[in-house]
Image: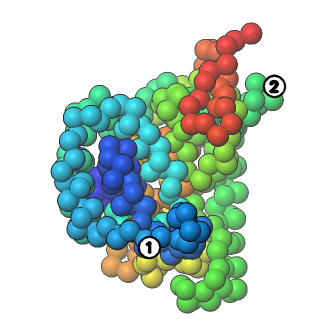
Amino acid sequence: MSSLLQGPRGRRLCLELAMELDQDIRIAVFHLGYNLDPGAGTSRRLLTMNPSGEAPPPPPEPTVDELAALITSLDLQTITTKLIHHALQRAVDTARYWQEPDGEDVLAATEEITESLAHIAKSLKGKPATQWWDQNALPGQWAIDWRAEADPAPLPRNPQHTLAEWARKERAEEIRAAKERPQDPDANFSGEWWSIPHGLIHTVARIPDGLGLVEDSLGWEEATVIPVAGTGRILEISTEEDWIKLCRDFPLEVTASRRHDWFRTTGRHGRWVIPDWERAAKEWDAVHLTVAGYLSTAGRPLRTDEDTASVIAGWDPGSTIWLTDVARETEGPRQFWHRPHNQDLWQMVPAG
């Protein structure tokens, strides 16, 4: 599990676990993260008044070294499956590739805190809740349609057309961005930031886990879950080398269209590529991102050659993208799930 700390999502997972285990750590992270957040403002400050109506002097704020000591001294015997899943969901929820990392992510990336999180990462190895993080794509999976039972829809078909249209739009956007946007990475421009195409069959192995592990979620509260089976040539993305090779084999230049967003989220200025998914479909039927691969790689610049890098962005952990027409809905029944408003727990709606 040492690779967890290489990626911002893996570091955030460990930091979230530390906060779940100790309230003093949560308070320290709140204060230190606030000071490191690029969008810091007064909204996160909690002011209390004494009987005279005056604000009392603020308590001394913790230091990074003090927080690191608290994390290092944690008793990890109380880590449960529920806490691990909640921390994983929080790590996914807080991913953002269109602006600077939040203060907690910046804090987790400091040398002192990363080193202190090492024993948390190590403790996760072998736990039942993490066994599926390295799991390859399974023949039977689930597609999620974020619509209610009363509004069913068939699975998307004709991936060849979808990918051709995606590639055409990506190249057109790159040409337009090169003409219209400045090369200064600090310029206030934003646009496409995803690394993957949309409109294809996209599946997850586990329900209800997959309902909560969604980057940039729109807060859906209804979902139709569709049983899907697919086989073929499936590429596993479990390390940065897997993604780098895919980008090298099928590079698509996206420097102009991703420059500003990916500079903000990674701090790197240079050329950018993503896989040309239309070309990749000639060799691969599907590509699966393991949870472990996501936690160690998503959101950081992955160097593909001397002056070029890529980012895995907008791809949910443990999910599979089907590039060719080999995935089919199976005979098993569709399931309908509901999440009560402002709650995290999904509940299956009884059939009938």
Query: Label 2 belongs to which residue?
Result: 150
- Residue 133 in view here: yes
Image position of 7 (left or right of 154) = left
| Residue situated furthest right in the rendering | 150
Q: Report the front residue among 186 and 278.
A: 186
In the image, what residue type sits under mark 2? Ala
Q: Report the front residue among 350 and 56.
A: 56
Badge 2: few (under 14), some or many (20 or more) residues near its Cα, within 10 Å?
A: few
In the image, what residue type sits under mark 1? Pro
Badge 1: few (under 14), some or many (20 or more) residues near its Cα, within 10 Å?
A: few
Query: Label 1 belongs to which residue?
Result: 57
- Residue 241 in view here: no
Mark 2 / mark 1, whichever is N-terminal? 1
Image position of 193 (left or right of 169) = left
Residue 309's x, y, as percent? 41, 72
Residue at horizontal 62%, vertical 89%? Answer: 182
Residue at horizontal 18%, vertical 51%? Answer: 73
Residue at disc 2, secondary structure: loop
Residue 291's x, y, as percent? 39, 43
From what the image shows, is residue 175 above or below residue 301?
A: below
Name the colouring of the figure: rainbow
Q: Where, by quadrant of the figure, is residue 138 drawn?
A: top left
Residue 147's x, y, as percent? 74, 34
Distance from the alpha carbon under mark 2 to that under mark 1: 56 Å
Residue at horizontal 70%, vertical 32%? Answer: 222
